[in-house]
Image (cartoon, coloured by chain):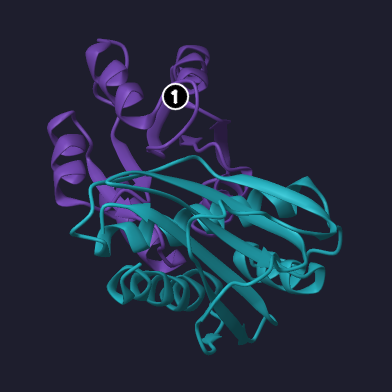
Chain colours: A cyan, B purple
């Protein structure tokens, strides 16, 4: 996987948090995944076209609640279907924004799916590298995982 | 003035509704996909503006837009696409199909307000 295929996800996350949530998301050091992250809610989008892959945005519960509160502009307390919808939409916006900068790839993105459950794991295909971008900032820590395989 | 919000995400409909409420528009109808939007337009012939997402299950926004513009009863209703589809070819496709305006996600509330005010005056 090329660095220029990861950088759009960095930019789109920072910009989307800044524009729609009015919050800072600060990226940490990018690393290759060796084991799945434990998360309480994950937004998942499939990638197809020139490559096959997936984007996973994995949040601890409190970060997700903070993110959704900022996204909606109103305080959220329940960890429910509304939080799932918001996390799915945010994953969709961030992936769609990254897609416009992946100009060398003819890419389609799926509708978002959301997994909600305490301390769950999201497995990825074993033959594809998974790049992890950790973020911290106003809403707390979360991780974006990007997996691509095929023409690159 | 009645406005139809079409998005499969209830969050996005809620964000748009909050922005419209702040502008004084509180007569809102909502639909969760393109097919639902056409039903809502039939049931609410007094809709004056449609905010339309692109990527939705059942019927996507572009097909919905084409149906709205092909129907003599709805063809004059302004439709603004509100979508994460940002490529120029997509924007041109929507404008050629009859979209009045186009707003790319992510957007801030001020951008949404400005676009709506530009359409409704």
For disc 1, the marked residue is B34
Q: Could you tell whether A86 is left or right of B33 in the image?
A: right
Instruction: Report x, y in % for residue B109.
Output: 46, 65
| Chain of the residue under label 1 | B
Q: Residue at x 36, y 64 (%)?
A: B111
* Local SS, label 1: helix
Residue A21, image quadrant: bottom right
In this rendered view, identify the residue nearer to me: B106 or B4.
B106
Instruction: Report x, y in % for residue A27.
Output: 51, 86
Instruction: Characterize the local packing of mark 1: few (<14), some (14-19) or many (20 or more) Cα atoms within 10 angstroms.
Output: many
Q: Could you tell whether A101 is left or right of A143 in the image?
A: left
Instruction: Report x, y in % for residue B19.
Output: 52, 57
In this rendered view, identify the residue nearer to me: B103 or B116.
B103
Q: Residue at x 18, y 59 (%)?
A: A104
In this rendered view, identify the residue nearer to me: A111 or B97.
A111
Q: Could you tell whether B51 is left or right of A21 in the image?
A: left
Seen in the picture, residue A37 relative to A25 is either above or below; the reply is above
Seen in the picture, residue A139 relative to A40 is either above or below; the reply is below
Instruction: Report x, y in % for residue B29.
Output: 56, 31
Count of picture labels = 1
Q: Residue at x 30, y 16 (%)?
A: B67
Q: Residue at x 41, y 62 (%)?
A: B106
Seen in the picture, residue A17 relative to A105 is either above or below; the reply is below
Q: Could you tell whether A68 is left or right of B20 in the image?
A: right
In this rendered view, identify the residue nearer to me: A37 or B2.
A37
Residue B50, image quadrant: top left
């Amino acid at each position: 996987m090329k660095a220029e295929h990861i950088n759009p996800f960095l930019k789109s996350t920072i910009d989307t948090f800044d524009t729609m949530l009015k919050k800072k998301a600060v990226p940490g050091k990018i690393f290759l995944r060796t084991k799945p992250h434990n998360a309480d809610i994950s937004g998942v989008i499939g990638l197809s076209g020139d490559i096959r892959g997936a984007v996973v945005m994995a949040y601890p519960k409190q970060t997700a609640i903070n993110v959704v509160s900022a996204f909606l502009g109103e305080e959220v307390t329940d960890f429910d279907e509304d939080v799932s919808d918001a996390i799915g939409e945010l994953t969709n916006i961030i992936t769609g924004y990254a897609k416009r900068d992946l100009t060398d790839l003819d890419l389609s993105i799926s509708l978002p799916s959301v997994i909600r459950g305490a301390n769950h794991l999201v497995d990825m295909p074993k033959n594809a590298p998974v790049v992890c971008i950790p973020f911290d900032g106003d809403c707390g820590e979360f991780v974006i995982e990007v997996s691509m395989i095929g023409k690159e | 003035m009645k406005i139809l919000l079409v998005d499969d995400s209830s969050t996005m409909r809620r964000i748009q509704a909050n922005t419209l409420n702040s502008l004084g528009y509180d007569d809102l109808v909502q639909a969760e996909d393109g097919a639902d939007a056409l039903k809502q337009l039939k049931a609410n012939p007094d809709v004056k503006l449609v905010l339309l997402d692109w990527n939705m299950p059942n019927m996507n926004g572009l097909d919905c837009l084409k149906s709205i513009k092909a129907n003599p009863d709805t063809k004059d209703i302004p439709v603004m696409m509100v979508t994460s589809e940002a490529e120029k070819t997509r924007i041109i496709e929507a404008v050629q199909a009859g979209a009045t305006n186009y707003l790319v996600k992510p957007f801030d509330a001020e951008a949404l307000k400005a676009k709506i005010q530009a359409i409704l005056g």
